[in-house]
Amino acid sequence: MATTLDLTRQALAERLERPRYEILPLDGIVEQVVAHVPTAARVTVTASPAKGLGATVDVAERLAAHGYTVVPHLSARLVHDPAHLEELTGRLLAAGVREVFVPAGDADPPAGEFHGAADLLRAMGDIRASFDEVGITGYPESHHLISDEETIQAMFAKAPMATCIISQICFDAGVIEDWVRQVRTRGTDLPIWIGLPGIVDYARLVRISMKIGLGESARFLGHHRSWMRRLITRQFKPDALMRGLAGTVADPDARIAGFHFYTFNEVERTERWRRATLARLAVPA
């Protein structure tokens, strides 16, 4: 008879068998993904005001041609108008891309008339049905620019137009678990992909975390700079965080679809860690 430990290990292993890897659309990343990431993994491609959505769609098209399930970001604040949205979705559908992630994005001011994800999702209209998956953002911690009340209301507005939730990075398993319970209590039942950092140097993780403002995690890092400096040559590994989430992952009522790894383009190291972790999690017959 399988023990509780076996069941939680199995639940973690099942999610690690089909991860999501988030990448930045930078030079050389397509070649890195093809060399190191199996096509069983979903690959999500971010967008930024500096590069625009053209770079995101370019990388998505190239990875789709290699047989990957690609999930490009359609950042609402980077879309100029309905014609631009039609052009982008047309290119993605023509490339065989059937999943998208729709965040608000960080462009300030917006490039056009869309100020948030709900605006863009509504503008997509019937074209949403052409995509098998439409993801929206979840915030386990307070957003550095948006109030908690706004993020809660935004989720209610977006949920009927989406198929899943992808959570922002959080370094506290307890906070993530509380957030999952709150999402379910409030009546949102979309599957949740839990966002975790991949294998990344602490120096880079601290720099990015402070830049994007990850609620209590960012404040913790800011108040413990001397401690973090001692870790500057080490790598962050998500093992402890993932173990802390094991109970929630194994709970069917939590509806955890899997793990969404923010790789910061460290795809080779993250994939090597994933395979080693799967080997350690192997549940005895």
Image (cartoon, rainbow, N blue to C red):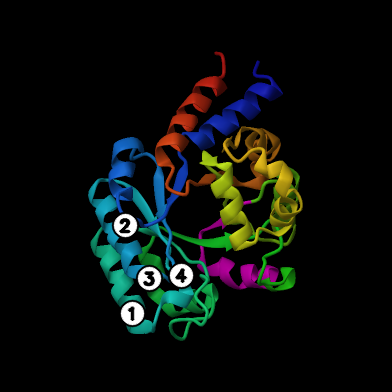
Amino acid under disc 3: Gly
Image quarter of residue 167: bottom right
Image disc number at residue 52: 3
Is 112 situated above or below 53? below
- The residues bearing labels 4 and 2 have C-alpha atoms spaced at a distance of 14 Å
CB under 8 Å between callouts 2 and 3?
A: no
Image disc number at residue 75: 4
Image disc number at residue 84: 1
One can see residue 195 in this view:
no
N-term mark: 2 or 3:
3
- The residues bearing labels 4 and 1 have C-alpha atoms spaced at a distance of 12 Å
Secondary-structure class at tag 3: helix
Q: Is residue 147 magenta?
A: no
Q: Is residue 153 magenta?
A: yes
Q: Is residue 223 left or right of residue 231?
A: right
Q: Is residue 55 left or right of residue 1?
A: left
Is 200 situated above or below 152? above
N-term mark: 4 or 3:
3
